[in-house]
Image: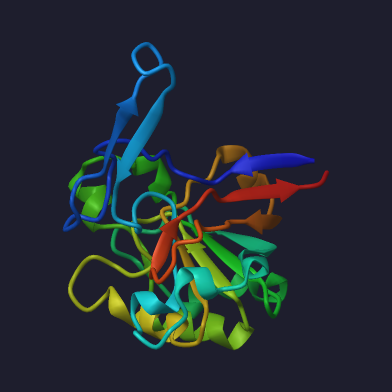
Amino acid sequence: MKVFDLSQNLYSSCPGWPTYQETVIKHETVVGIQGYTSERLDLNTHTATHLDAPFHFYPEGKTIDEIPLERFIGRAVILNLEGCEACHAITAEDMLPWKEKIKRDGIVLLYTGWCKKRGFSREYYNDWPYLSGEGAEWLLEQGVKGVGIDGMSMGGWHEGTGRPCHEVLLSRGVWLLEELDFPEEVLQYQDVMLHCAPLKLTGCGGSPCRAYAIVED
């Protein structure tokens, strides 16, 4: 059995959505002074590798703590879309080669290569490839329960590109997993078992999570 960490590091001032306040992690106690070490964390819940629940866009939608834990575990298909251009809108046509592998109540993970660019560049912050509204509709037709991507968001940064895929998928109870990291070795596999449990944050529209893939050779 192999386990692959699909999570980006979370640290003070790490990359985050451009309009959010900066993440701060600091020691509240230190072992050399108080006898033990502990930290205080101040961040937006949609920072680094994280999940979006329907409540993120819909006040009547489920919050992250209301989604059954088993929904965040399942067979996932990795769609290797590396090489797509900046700001590319991922469509059904892009995903068709994997159609037979995508199962009802399964998970789709979109790898664009953007996780390798993580940093404070305009390219990473503004120009990642994203899922189009039409692509989201197609995934909905396949019956998926979750969709992941390695960009800052499932939708794009530029005007008119951010909301469509969120609206299509979240309105139908499909969770979104954003800012994934894909180790090179995991790309050898198309089918993995994904685990991405969120924190049990009451009444929240999203949560950081530790996403990982399990492969049994």
The residue lying toward the viewer, choosing from 110 and 167, is 167
Residue 195 x/y as whole percent: 64, 55
Residue 12 x/y as whole percent: 28, 36
What is the quadrant of the N terminus in the image? top right
Report the residue that reaches farthest toward the right: 217
Left/right placement of residue 62 relative to residue 28 reads right
Residue 33 x/y as whole percent: 34, 13
Residue 121 x/y as whole percent: 21, 43
Report the residue that reaches farthest toward the front: 34
Residue at position x 16%, y 58% from top?
19
Report the residue that reaches farthest toward the top: 32
What is the quadrant of the C terminus in the image? top right
Residue at position x 28%, y 73% from top?
162
User: How many callouts does the rendering have?
Assistant: 0
State whether residue 1 is above or below residue 36.
Answer: below
* Residue 174 shows in this picture: yes
Residue at position x 17%, y 74% from top?
159
Left/right placement of residue 55 relative to residue 172 reads left
The residue lying toward the viewer, choosing from 48 and 188, is 48
Image quadrant in which you'd find residue 35: top left
* Residue 191 shows in this picture: no
